[in-house]
Image (spheres, helix red, strand yellow):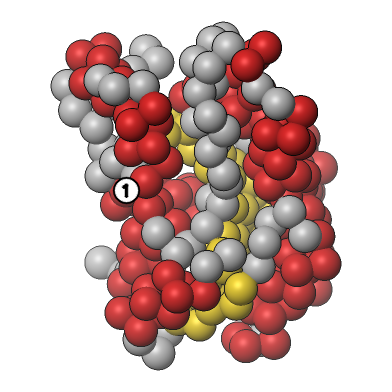
Amino acid sequence: MDKLLEGKVVFITGAGRGIGAAAARLFAAEGAQVMLAARTESELAAVTREIGTSAAYTVADLADPDAVHAAVDRAVSEYGRLDGAFNNGAIGIPPGPMDTMSVDQFDQGYAVNLRGLWTAMVAEVTAIRATAGHGSIVNTSSVGSLAGNPALPAYGALKRAGNSLTESAAITYGPENIRVNAIAPGTTLTEMLHDWDRATPGIIDSLNARTPLGRAAQPDEIAQAAAWLLSDRSSYVTGTVLRVDGGLAA
């Protein structure tokens, strides 16, 4: 069988660790050339070295719109085109009730998790339209966006707003054959999840107990869903928020 992403150029945010790093490795193994973006150069450099010649990286903070546009431009200048993007970058917000969160914490979450997503999607659509002419964008949402989320109210709200952006973009750019989807991971063994478990001891075990498959996902399992949505094998899928959660939100 042909590789899933053979010949495609894919831009990845949040690519230094967790789901983003797993996606970079997987997409390259599936035939893509990948441009990795994140805030921490040492992490990006390590993942890029591991992948080899089919990967390059650029440092970018999603809270900085100019840096986001420059990162997408770098992908085009490096590889000559853009076929797809995986908008995985995000920051965690400390768990707790709404009234315990500071305005600064909310504003930082908004700047990265929603405004940064919007900025990246605009830059990516522009690049895809100008080069490949058609393509696919996948955004990382969360099962925490699908219902009330008292433990992570701002994070869930911002991710739910990202779902709306995903759906609106799918309608807007579908006539140009640019597909836009999101994945909604459940409990996934990333640094962000471990941070939550340190702040709320036992939360991973509690979530696993509520999950029909009885365990957390490895980052690669989430990346597999993103790879499929970026590929031509999902050619009639757009505007969806795909749960990849072991049944947690069923």
Residue 28 position within the rendered picture, expressed as x and y whole percent measured from the top left: 38, 73
Q: Nearer the viewer, residue 119 or 31?
A: 119
- Please name the residue shown 53% across and 50% down the image: 88
Question: In the drawing, does residue 37 fall left or right of residue 173?
Answer: left
Question: In the drawing, does residue 40 fall left or right of residue 28?
Answer: right
Q: Residues within 10 Å of mark 1 (few under 14, many from 20)?
A: many
Residue 69 in sight in this render: yes
Question: In the drawing, does residue 34 fall left or right of residue 169?
Answer: left
Q: Give the answer, above or below, for where 184 lies relative to 170.
A: above
Q: Is the N terminus in the top left, top right, bottom left or bottom right quadrant?
A: bottom left
The image quadrant that residue 181 belongs to is top right
Residue 107 position within the rendered picture, expressed as x and y whole percent measured from the top left: 76, 36
- Please name the residue shown 81% across and 60% down the image: 65
Q: Give the answer, above or below, for where 222 lies relative to 141.
A: below
Q: Residue furthest left?
A: 214
Q: How many marks?
A: 1
* Residue at the disc numbered 1: 219
Residue 48 position within the rendered picture, expressed as x and y whole percent measured from the top left: 41, 79
The image quadrant that residue 102 belongs to is top right
- Please name the residue shown 73% across and 54% down the image: 63
- Please name the residue shown 39% across and 37% down the image: 195
Q: Is the C terminus in the top left, top right, bottom left or bottom right quadrant?
A: top left
Q: Give the answer, above or below, for where 43 lies relative to 169.
A: below
Question: In the drawing, does residue 17 fall left or right of residue 135?
Answer: left
SS at badge 1: helix
Q: Give the answer, above or below, for where 106 lies relative to 28.
A: above
- Tell me the amino acid under the disc marked 1: Pro
Residue 193 in sight in this render: no
Residue 22 position within the rendered picture, expressed as x and y whole percent measured from the top left: 35, 59
